[in-house]
């Protein structure tokens, strides 16, 4: 049975996490209301905001209830353990059920056809088979001025890529109930970021991941971004510094620990890839480089793969 007999009639749970988001929140909510796909419900987990975030949400909740004659916005108290825990806790709630699920950030602007494009891709897949949609983004500044686009990745999404790189921002991700149930079975694990974890789980289980080179989100760049774009020399310098400081090694340790919980549910070939990649983190330089080549892990660019080689040499993976 397909996930959605008709993509146009499928239901979507939009999972929005907020914290001190008063500056740009209304623009994001307005962009959700403009979606060409109409069968959505918004669930907002607020992580203890002390600005006007809660008041803005309550205002939209009241106005939308009058406009749509049904509750389209539900406000929930977050766990207050950081944005990743907030997203994963919201994702795992038993009272949220839909055909598809979409992560949502508080400061972006969605293109009107974001959900429609994602659901068109997801519709052929069985609800039992995890499937994930992600896309490129258009970067904007605090005044909505365009700054360019995020990199357009051309190599195929795969678990071998997901082990060392996340190609889809959470603000673009939409996934089916098969993916949601798999993520929910593990719970709010201790991982660096929810979107990278989602890519790892769906690709690792043998699910389907689609990367859309068409931008679906206007991704706002500002001083309070949790992650920010990887576009430009400054961003690359920051990531190189994080690699040398051991930040990526710490993140990989967290991801590998969480993946061990799911090991039996990974596709057989991905279980082998995971075991080989773990050897890249061993003490011997020769063993690390041999395991790196054998594992088949890759990033999307030549520079990125060169960085992998350097990290393996330095024992920073």
Image (tube, helix red, strand yellow):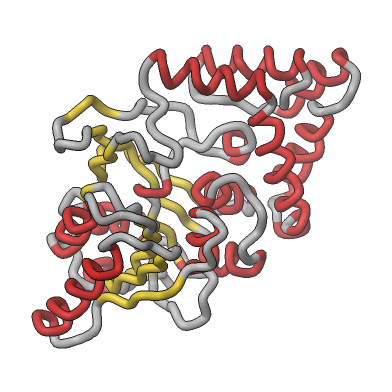
**At 34% across and 41% down in the image, what residue appears?**
135
Residue 5 horizontal/vertical position (percent):
32, 73
186 relative to 317, above or below: below
Confirm whether residue 240 shows in the render: yes
Q: Is residue 233 left or right of residue 159?
A: left
Q: Nearer the viewer, residue 208 or 31?
A: 31
Q: Which residue sits at x=23%, y=41%? A: 218
- 199 relative to 228, above or below: below
| Left or right of residue 140, residue 263 in this image | right
State the residue in front, 246 or 224: 224
Name which quarter of the figure residue 16 lies in: bottom left
Q: Residue at 25% x, 56% y: name it.
A: 22
Q: Is residue 92 left or right of residue 17?
A: right
Q: Quadrant of the N terminus?
A: bottom left
Image x and y of residue 297, in percent: 65, 28
Task: Say whether residue 129 is visible.
Answer: no
Based on the displayed image, in which of its 4 quarters is residue 226 positioned? Answer: top left
At 24% from the left edge and 75% from the top edge, which residue is drawn? 58
Query: What percent of the width, then of the height, locates residue 259?
Result: 71, 51
Foreground of the two, 190 or 296: 190
In the picture shown, does residue 116 fall above or below 170?
below
**Quadrant showing the C terminus:** top right
């Amino acid at each position: 049975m397909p996930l959605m007999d008709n993509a146009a009639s499928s239901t979507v749970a939009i999972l929005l996490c907020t914290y001190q988001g008063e500056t740009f929140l209304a623009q994001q909510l307005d962009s959700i209301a403009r979606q060409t796909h109409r069968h959505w419900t918004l669930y907002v987990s607020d992580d203890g905001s002390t600005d006007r975030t809660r008041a803005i949400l309550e205002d939209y909740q009241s106005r939308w209830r009058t406009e749509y004659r049904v509750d389209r916005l539900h406000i929930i108290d977050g766990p207050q353990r950081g944005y990743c825990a907030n997203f994963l806790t919201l994702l795992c709630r038993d009272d949220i059920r839909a055909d598809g699920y979409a992560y949502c950030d508080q400061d972006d602007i969605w293109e009107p056809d974001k959900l429609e494009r994602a659901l068109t891709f997801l519709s052929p897949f069985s609800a039992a088979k995890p499937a994930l949609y992600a896309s490129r983004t258009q970067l904007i500044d605090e005044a909505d001025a365009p700054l360019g686009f995020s990199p357009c990745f051309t190599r195929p999404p795969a678990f071998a890529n997901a082990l060392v790189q996340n190609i889809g921002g959470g603000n673009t991700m939409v996934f089916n109930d098969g993916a949601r149930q798999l993520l929910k079975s593990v719970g709010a694990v201790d991982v660096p970021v929810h979107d990278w974890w989602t890519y790892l789980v769906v690709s690792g289980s043998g699910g389907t991941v689609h990367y859309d080179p068409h931008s679906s989100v206007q991704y706002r760049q500002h001083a309070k971004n949790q992650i920010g774009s990887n576009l430009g020399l400054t961003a690359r310098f920051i990531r190189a510094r994080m690699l040398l400081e051991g930040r990526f090694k710490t993140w990989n340790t967290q991801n590998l620990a969480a993946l061990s919980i799911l090991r039996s549910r990974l596709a057989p070939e991905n279980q082998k890839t995971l075991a080989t990649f773990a050897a890249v983190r061993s003490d011997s330089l020769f063993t690390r480089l041999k395991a790196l080549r054998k594992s088949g892990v890759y990033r999307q660019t030549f520079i990125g793969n060169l960085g992998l080689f350097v990290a393996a040499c330095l024992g920073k993976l």
